[in-house]
Image: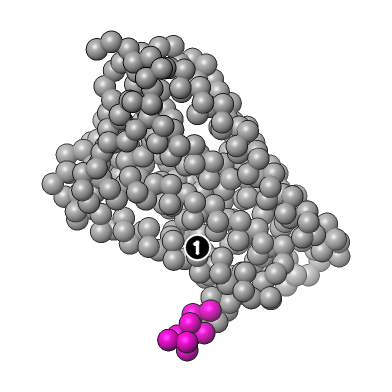
């Protein structure tokens, strides 16, 4: 097959993959995924609505939580159409530009989630180490600036990575190995040199999730040092308890990411459907789990959610 040049890149059609070897069971497999999507969309929408409508939640901690819920909604919606399209109607085809758009938004919301988790770690550090100045440090305008910076950072880092794919020629199999467009997947289908693309992709990963994870860890080292300096054991326990939800959110973001990397590196002998199922659920775990974690572990969120649900029932 002759290479497809950049001038015809808009006519390239990729084929997404469902669950290899289990195509006959796609309708059944779609049921748990529908439940996960419904949980993610309803849970994050409910928390976002509760924060926006309940004045008691108009505080920096909950503003950052609203940012987290927004990114989780975006991440879920970025993969919903192609994943359920494959399971329901075997709609595997996706155009080149549509593929790049989906890839960009998946990566953007992933980077934004990492950035928001870092901002939430900073929020907890300020609240514990300098509670008297908490309100003056994290003002509404400063939180808005952080939100804008999160979006700009992701856009600036990811735009070159996605744009560089348009310079490649594609002459190999057009079959991608996921139910959504994944940057390494698309690169592997190119018959031209992808070293620049690989370098830019690795740089984007290191400068986002890599840097964020280091600073989150550093924040918790400083938080632990501050908490241990508190004389009262009751106060220490209370300070640590305010971090439990955030620690859970960090865990459900980074543990699946690390697990997926290990599976790709060391699980090459595993059946293909194992890799596909893990990759499919990887992007759904944070959006599904974050609303549950914050509803269970944060009393104010739990009360606000119950209040919103109760008022909606009374209206019906």
Residue 230 is drawn in which quadrant? Answer: bottom right
Can residue 229 be seen by looking at this rendering?
no
Residue at left 69%, top 76%?
56
Could you tell me residue 266's position as x and y percent? 36, 30
Please give left or right for residue 78 compared with residue 231 in the image: left
> Which of 244 and 170 lies nearest the eye of the viewer?
170
> Which of 210 and 57 lies nearest the eye of the viewer?
57
In which quadrant is the N terminus drawn? top left
Could you tell me how many numbered marks the image carries?
1
In which quadrant is the C terminus drawn? bottom left
- Give the residue at mark 1: 44
Could you tell me residue 148's position as x and y percent? 68, 47
Residue 313: in magenta span = yes
In the image, residue 98 above or below residue 232 = above
> Which of 64 and 10 lies nearest the eye of the viewer?
10
Residue 266: in magenta span = no
Residue at left 32%, top 41%?
179
Residue at left 72%, top 49%?
146
In the image, residue 194 above or below residue 131 = above
Could you tell me residue 9's position as x and y percent? 38, 22
- Provide the residue span drawn in magenta: 308-316
Could you tell me residue 55's position as x and y percent? 68, 75
Residue 218 is drawn in which quadrant? Answer: top right
What secondary structure is the stretch in magenta mostly built from? helix
Please give left or right for residue 185 compared with residue 126 in the image: left
């Amino acid at each position: 097959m002759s290479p497809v040049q950049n001038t015809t890149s808009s006519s390239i059609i990729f084929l997404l993959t469902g669950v290899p070897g289990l195509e006959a069971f796609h309708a059944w497999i779609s049921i748990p995924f529908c439940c996960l999507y419904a949980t993610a969309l309803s849970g994050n929408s409910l928390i976002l609505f509760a924060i926006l409508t309940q004045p008691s939640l108009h505080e920096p901690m909950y503003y950052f939580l609203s940012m987290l819920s927004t990114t989780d909604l975006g991440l879920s919606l970025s993969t919903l159409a192609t994943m359920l399209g494959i399971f329901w109607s075997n709609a595997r085809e996706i155009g080149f530009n549509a593929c790049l758009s989906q890839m960009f938004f998946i990566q953007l919301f992933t980077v934004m989630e990492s950035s928001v988790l870092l901002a939430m770690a900073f929020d907890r550090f300020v609240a514990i180490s300098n509670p008297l100045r908490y309100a003056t440090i994290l003002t509404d305008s400063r939180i808005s600036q952080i939100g804008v910076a999160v979006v700009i950072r992701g856009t600036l880092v990811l735009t070159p990575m996605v744009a560089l794919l348009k310079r490649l020629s594609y002459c190999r199999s057009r079959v991608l190995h996921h139910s959504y467009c994944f940057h390494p997947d698309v690169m592997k289908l190119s018959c031209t040199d992808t070293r620049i693309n690989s370098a830019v992709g690795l740089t984007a990963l290191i400068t986002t999730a890599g840097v964020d994870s280091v600073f989150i860890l550093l924040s918790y080292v400083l938080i632990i040092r501050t908490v241990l300096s508190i004389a009262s054991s009751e106060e220490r326990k209370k300070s640590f308890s305010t971090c439990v939800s955030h620690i859970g959110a960090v865990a459900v973001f980074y543990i699946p990411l690390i697990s997926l990397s290990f599976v790709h590196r060391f699980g090459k002998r595993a059946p293909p459907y194992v890799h596909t199922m893990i990759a499919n659920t990887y992007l759904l775990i944070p959006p599904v789990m974050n609303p549950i974690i914050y509803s269970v572990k944060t009393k104010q969120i739990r009360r606000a959610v119950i209040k919103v649900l109760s008022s909606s029932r009374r209206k019906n």
